[in-house]
Amino acid sequence: MKLIPVIMSGGVGSRLWPVSRQTHPKPFMPLPDGDNLIRKTFRRAAALEDVVEIITVTNRELLFKTEDEYKQVPTAELALSYVLEPFGRNTAAAVAAAALHAQSQHGDDSILLVLAADHLVSDESGFKAVVGQASKLAAAGYLVTFGIEPSRPETGYGYIECDAQAPLEHGFRVKRFVEKPDLETARMYVQAGNFLWNSGMFCLRTGTVIAELARHAPDVLQSVQATLAASRLAQSKNYASITLDAEQFGHVPDISIDYALMERSDQVATIPCSIGWSDIGSWDAVSELIPADESGNHIEGEVLLHQACNNYVRSTERLAALVGVQDLVVVDTSDALLIAHKDKAQDVKHIVSQLKRSGHSAHLVHSTVHRPWGTYTVLEESERFKIKRIVVKPKASLSLQMHHHRSEHWIVVNGMARVINNDMDLLLNTNESTFIPAGHKHRLENPGVIDLVLIEVQSGDYLGEDDIVRFEDVYGRA
């Protein structure tokens, strides 16, 4: 049996703002144990038996960040493929694209294991066992969902009602899917005993899911097929990336796989499981990963407390102090501070919506921005100047580029820099500097084996990140 995990990494995680943002979303957010969700998901998928390839569906701007995370997980030579979306189009499009790619490479009988990149599973041995059971049901023609046995009435999850009159080996046929309930309805579901949390994880035979999409959501399947036909494929040994054509992808219906297929098909089954699953959907869920102190506080970072109880505080960059408060969520980052009552933790997404409407960049990026070559951090900025700390990874380089409106002064503070400045080719050591006038073609490269760190001082009449003309780029951005 050929097993193909499909890691879907398209969500923003707006309820975990201000740490989760569009260019650094929830799967990449550091957890209290120092790991993150995307590495955990990749490690969990790679450890399964019979895996022949892992497909990741993500935004094309997150490709290099994702590859960097995967490189930190030791694996044998495993085939990796990336389906790169120009923008989000919901999960039906993601599953259809992954299934069509898997069909072209491995045929109709391959088994897709669809996983969200931002979910936590603590019982990995139990997860492996359930995947084995689900694979057998999928091979028999069922569209299999993973139903989580509820530990409490939960209003933040959708539910699956099992058909107790139609048991299967290790599972049940699905009677219906139900939306997130109110608290009283959730209590009724838990008491009934045949309702499960909808985890959003699926196990599907490739040929079956494509046939069922053709039957129940032909517009999704056909538009994704047209998109793939117009898309750019880059392929080498054990690697492929498919950059989806933006114009064609814009015609794909924006619909979830649940609505498009799972709620319409008569071939849906579910396997009840208890595998330590959480979607880490709010700061309350994050706080549960940290042991509480004697007053019920969950703390990350340097925090002082006086007569404070039942709070969650995350302040990893500076000292925070709480006095005489309770039941608060406090999350402090270098450029944004969140304070919320625990009862309203799910409503943080409304702040993100306000930021989007106002055009504020705090929903989009952190003060430290990740790039394929490293990072930059804005230290200070004004109308006519901006100061950045730039870190370039060993052997990495920025594009050959030019700015119309700004000049740049570079001062090396750690490592060695190779600088192209019009016709000059320079090597700069620590404490050396160079000046790049506006209009000069230039490139920055780290030829060494340690991180290159430099301070960049920009000056000019316009300092926007869109004042850049790329002539050459090893990351395909020119």
Image (cartoon, rainbow, N blue to C red):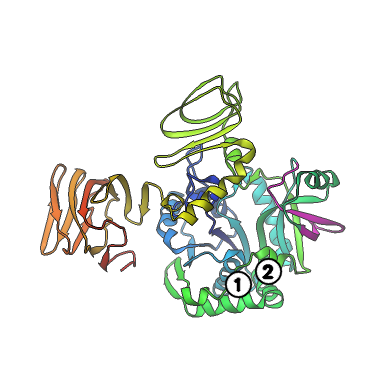
Farthest left residue in view: 424
Point out the image quarter for the C terminus: bottom left
Q: Quadrant of the N terminus?
A: bottom right
The answer to the question of whether label 1 and label 2 lie on touching residues, with beta carbons closer than 8 A, is yes
- Quarter of the image for residue 406 reads bottom left
Q: Please state the total of marks drawn on the protein image.
A: 2
* Magenta span includes 160: yes
Residue 1 visible in the snapshot: no
Q: Assess whether residue 209 is covered by the magenta stretch.
A: no
Q: Judge by depth and name the residue closer to the eye, 288 or 38.
A: 288
Q: Which residues are magenta?
A: 153-177
Residue appearing at x 58%, y 69% in the figure: 93
Of labels 1 and 2, the one closer to you: 1
User: Is residue 348 found left or right of 214 in the rendered image?
Assistant: left
Q: CA distance from mark 1 to mark 2?
A: 9 Å
N-terminal label among 1 and 2 = 1
Q: Quick check: 210 left or right of 54?
A: right
Counting other residues with Cα less than 10 Å from the Cα at mark 2, is it few (<14), some (14-19), or many (20 or more)? many
Other-residue count near label 1 (Cα within 10 Å), few / some / many at <14 / 14–19 / ≥20? some
Residue 216 locus on image (x, y percent): 71, 74
* Residue 336 to residue 467: above or below: above
x, y (%) of residue 182? Answer: 75, 47
The dot on residue 21 is none
Where does residue 308 sit, x and y in percent of width and height? 56, 23
> What numbered label is drawn on residue 260?
2
Q: Amino acid at mark 2?
A: Ala
Q: Is residue 52 above or below residue 197?
A: below
Residue at the (59%, 64%) spot, across then down = 90
Q: Which residue is mark 1?
A: 253
| Residue 218 can be seen, yes or no | yes
